[in-house]
Amino acid sequence: MPSFIIEHQCPQCGAPAELEETDRLVRCGFCRVGSYLHVPEVFRYVLPSRAPEGTDLIYVPYWRFKGMFFSCYPGGMDQRFTDISQQAIATHHFPVNVGFRSQTQKLQFAVARPGGTYLKPQLTQAELMTGLNQRFRANLPKPILHQAHIGETLSLLYAPYYLKGRLMDAILNEAVPSGSAEGIAPLLEDHEPPAWPINFIPTLCPQCGWDLEGISDALALACPNCQTVWWARNGKLEQLRTAYVAGSEEQMVYMPFWRIQADITGMTLENYADLIRVANLPKVVQPGMDEQRFYFWAPAFKVRPHRFLSFGAHVTASQPVERHVAGYPEAAAAVHGVNLPIQEAVESLKLILTVFVRPRKRLEDLLRTMQITARRYRLVYLPFHEGPHELIHRGMNLAISKNLLANARQM
């Protein structure tokens, strides 16, 4: 699924630039100033208009969702990646979605424009997700025991239209099929000013003033000088609790995982001994295992749905016990970026359990009654040996395809 392109101006020097939809870390090619993009709610973009100059435009909102959907039912699970748009107002006057236009046109951030009226979205985020859940469960076996959406990119797209005797498409300058101007006037009364700020947070370490580093879609930025990691919270950078397991070989790549401690109702899963019983692992409970606390482990990086669950379940079942070093891997180490937030990892915990719980007949009752509440979390970097095509953790017998990681950048 290709990301769409956004035209942008550097907040420091005004130089033009182009961003991908997933970009959060922006470094100007002219003044070299780095900024991290952050919004209080969702990013809002506007499609370009080719209407005659001076035309009063009508900007119609569309929700855009891109992410992973999981639906659990007796005997199986539906896993899919989807990219859809949906009209955010209740009307038949405008097209129900934007089609491929978000991929074929260069977008801009939604800001005030002369002669423009931005219609107010009537469909809330919660209503949107409820509708998507119902849509994706329609053709699945019943009953649906659990649904979750993980790693989603949610945004609002504004498509331009105008009136010229009838409703006109401002991108093509053509009449909208069956687009009558009658009934448009009441819609124009429910509008809102485009007062949606974008925070450009300087990417300087709040602790030592060094330049922070990260991939373009990073949700966490690292300081190579003081070995700290920072993420955006409430319009500013806050330090993130991190640790890593020191690698013992050359050619190591550190992969980020969320280690989460949670309370679970309906199941006893507090320590490693409980895990052996719940997952029916081929091990004998040894003295001391009941003192080894159980943690969930979820990838802090995006991959395809089935691999995301597979990696999370594999590391959770392995329960890495190597000594953790507080902070960030040494500056010379190769570190994979963090682009899946902790909120999404928490959403995946019940799904991860479904992968290894035994016997399988217990799942239906568990999914109906089990509640999982996250209590504490930490971002932990685990060392993987870098091979020609895969990253390999020999201790856990886990391999991650490099091609899989490269393709996931567009998710």
Image (spheres, rainbow, N blue to C red):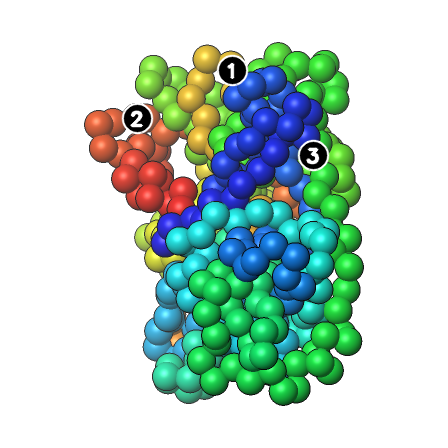
Dot 3 or dot 2: first in sequence order is: 3
> Label 2, on which residue?
386
Residue 359: x and y, percent? 38, 70
User: Looking at the rendered structure, which numbered label has been put on residue 200?
Assistant: 3
Residue at x 60% of width, y 82% of height: 181
Residue at x 69% of width, y 75% of height: 122
Q: CA distance from mark 3 to mark 2?
A: 35 Å
Q: CA distance from mark 3 to mark 1?
A: 28 Å
User: Looking at the rendered structure, which numbered label has been put on residue 234?
Assistant: none
Residue at x 52% of width, y 44% of height: 6
The amino acid pointed to by label 2 is Glu
Q: Residues within 10 Å of mark 3 (few under 14, many from 20)?
A: many
The amino acid pointed to by label 1 is Glu
The amino acid pointed to by label 3 is Phe
The quarter of the picture where residue 11 lies is: top right
* Circle 1: element type: loop
Residue 333: x and y, percent? 44, 18
Q: Residues within 10 Å of mark 2 (few under 14, many from 20)?
A: many
Against 273, is 259 above or below? above
Q: Residues within 10 Å of mark 1 (few under 14, many from 20)?
A: few
Q: Is residue 280 left or right of residue 196?
A: left
* Circle 2: element type: strand
> Label 1, on which residue?
330
